[in-house]
Image: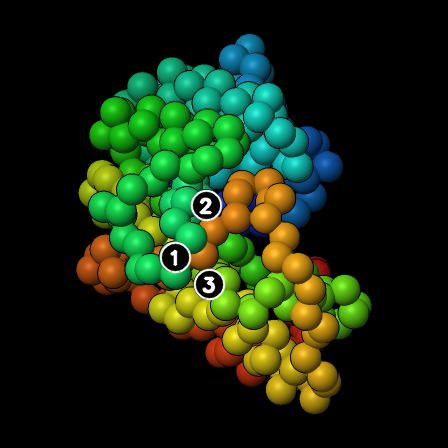
């Protein structure tokens, strides 16, 4: 039975862990806090701090024997220091504890700093202008040097999480400028299935994990206005002070699709039609 460790079995990682278990893999899920273990019923799981090498002594046997590691640890809402701890130090510790495993590192499409609305793929320049983005790139290079895969995830939404829907329904949404900034998203379960595909295909390199249909900010809010029969949000100034920088680009997922992966939700409109307001309901 092939074995895999999912380090950071949270919103996306827990779904990936369950998909792998259903496919017959021996799965060890790692979370940061004991409270998070409650959401991993049916899985072998442990709580430890991957940023502290000593914490990995307990799952050391599973890491040493793992054939694959999916590293999807989150930095929370911290700044550069938290990013370095979670993405660089933590990845370094896990790779040292799992010397034979192929690594799938989850990064972000925010590393593409393009602002001209152009299409970007994995060969496009990835030169983020924020320190947090540069730290992600450092961790990416660590995984690639190991012969691993990097999954650059677009904005994640799904059960209990949809920032645009939440802002729209609570009345805090603003269309910035002309609303022409391009937005790239991925449904949670589609992100998880992409991580599984990368862990099981054993093909190294960088892969964008985004749905098929990027949309402008205006387009997203127009979809929501139509779905809920409400007016469009008001217009306002462009907000460039974003944690990972202000960008506008369309992210291609062609390389990932070439592996045979297909998103269940090709665009935000598909998810809205099926889920509606239930996107803000947390699964039990």
Q: In this view, does 70 lie to the left or right of 234?
A: left
Distance of label 1 from label 3 (alpha carbons): 9 Å
* Depth order, front residue of 250/52: 250
Residue located 59% across and 40% down the image:
243
Residue 12 image offset from top left, x and y in percent:
52, 50
Callout 2: SS: helix
* 10 Å crowding of disc 3: few (<14), some (14-19), many (20+): many
Residue located 22% across and 39% down the image:
204
Q: Nearer the viewer, mark 2 or mark 1?
A: 1
Q: In which quarter of the image is the C terminus?
A: bottom right
The answer to which of marks 1 and 3 sits earlier in the sequence is 1
Q: Mark 2 points at which residue?
A: 110
Q: Name the residue under label 1.
A: 116
Residue located 63% across and 52% down the image:
239
Q: Is residue 141 left or right of residue 57?
A: left
* Depth order, front residue of 136/97: 136
Residue 193 image offset from top left, x and y in percent:
39, 56
Residue 56 image offset from top left, x and y in percent:
52, 18
The answer to which of marks 2 and 1 sits earlier in the sequence is 2
Residue 218 image offset from top left, x and y in percent:
56, 73
Distance of label 2 from label 1 (alpha carbons): 14 Å
Q: Do labels 2 and 1 touch, CB within 8 Å? A: no
Instruction: Give the number of the disc on residue 182.
Output: 3
Q: Do labels 1 and 3 touch, CB within 8 Å? A: no
């Amino acid at each position: 039975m092939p074995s895999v460790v999912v380090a950071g079995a949270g919103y996306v990682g827990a779904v990936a862990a369950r998909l792998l278990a259903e496919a017959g893999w021996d799965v060890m899920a790692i979370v940061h806090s004991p409270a998070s273990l409650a959401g991993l019923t049916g899985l072998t799981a442990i709580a430890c701090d991957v940023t502290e090498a000593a914490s990995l002594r307990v799952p050391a046997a599973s890491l040493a024997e793992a054939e694959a590691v999916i590293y999807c640890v989150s930095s929370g809402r911290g700044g550069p220091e938290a990013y370095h701890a979670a993405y660089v130090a933590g990845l370094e510790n896990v790779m040292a504890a799992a010397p034979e495993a192929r690594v799938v590192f989850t990064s972000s499409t925010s590393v593409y700093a393009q602002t001209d609305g152009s299409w970007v793929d994995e060969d496009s320049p990835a030169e983020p202008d924020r320190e947090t983005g540069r730290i992600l790139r450092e961790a990416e290079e660590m995984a690639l040097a190991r012969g691993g895969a990097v999954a650059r995830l677009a904005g994640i939404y799904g059960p209990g999480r949809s920032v645009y829907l939440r802002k729209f329904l609570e009345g805090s949404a603003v269309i910035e400028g002309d609303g022409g900034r391009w937005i790239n998203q991925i449904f949670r379960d589609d992100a998880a299935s992409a991580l599984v595909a990368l862990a099981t295909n054993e093909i190294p390199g960088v892969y964008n994990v985004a749905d098929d249909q990027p949309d402008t900010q205006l387009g997203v809010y127009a979809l929501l206005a139509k779905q809920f029969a409400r007016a469009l949000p008001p217009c306002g100034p462009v907000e460039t002070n974003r944690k990972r920088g202000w960008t506008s680009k369309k992210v291609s997922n062609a390389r990932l699709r070439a592996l045979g992966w297909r998103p269940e939700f090709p665009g935000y409109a598909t998810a809205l039609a099926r889920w509606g307001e239930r996107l803000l309901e947390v699964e039990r």
